[in-house]
Image (spheres, rainbow, N blue to C red):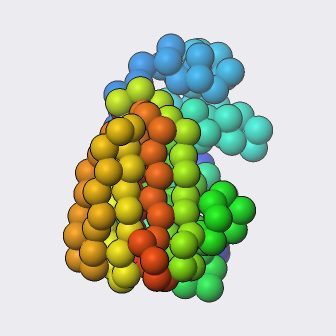
Amino acid sequence: MTENTNDILNRLPARLKEARRAKGLSLEAVANLSGVSRSMVSQIERGESSPTISTLWNLTRALQVDFAGLLDSEKAHDRIDVIRAEEAPTIENMGEGCRIRILSPPEEAGHHEVYELIFTEGGALRSQPHTRGATEQLTVISGEVLVTSGNAESTLSQGDTARYAADVPHSIQSAGSPARALLIVKNA
């Protein structure tokens, strides 16, 4: 980044205000979520005060925006964010014979999450209920899987998509052979 500090400080107030408005939050709500006083948030948005790194970090967490992206000079529509296959975070110990690749950005955690599920033969992912109103959408890329949501059960083949409640005990397991699927979790 070869920009000077003044360029960043000139962009910051507007970017914070845009992020707050995009989330539909008042100054008071951001203050409560971030622990930064309402008057300080207002001063920062008006460009009358420069936040410390700690204050900026608290604000970006409260607004669920990317710290670096907030300071970036590129507009979102002039950029493509890429996660290379080998760089995607994975979870190996949440199921039996199931590897989970996290495809969604960290700021989406708890809201709209996207995963690739890779099952060995007989592999399974069993989940406790998520937040009330949560749903999942599963699309099978290869193989077959058995999906259970509460007392409902369905077998899906390559290309099939299922939508089901995730606020009840639910599970996905390979139906006899290795399988791959994309999972979207949407919390209400």
Corner quadrant of residue 137 = bottom left
Residue 89 place in picture, x, y as percent = 64, 70
Which residue is at the far front?
176
- Image spot of residue 23 (x, y percent): 38, 34
In front of the other: 7 or 121: 121
Between 111 and 162, the one nearer to me in the picture:
162
Residue 51: quarter of image: top right
Q: In which quarter of the view is residue 86 placed?
A: bottom right
Q: Which residue is drawn at 54% across and 79% down?
A: 121
Image quarter where the N terminus lies is bottom right
Residue 22 appears in the picture as rendered: yes
Q: Which residue appears at 36% of the width and 83% of the height?
A: 142
Residue 164 percent across, percent down from the top left: 30, 46
Question: In screen coordinates, is 176 left or right of 122?
Answer: left
The C terminus is located in which quarter?
Answer: top left
- One can see residue 47 in this view: no
Q: Residue at x 41, y 27 (%)?
A: 132
Q: Is residue 72 left or right of residue 147?
A: right
Q: In this view, does 43 lie to the left or right of 183?
A: right
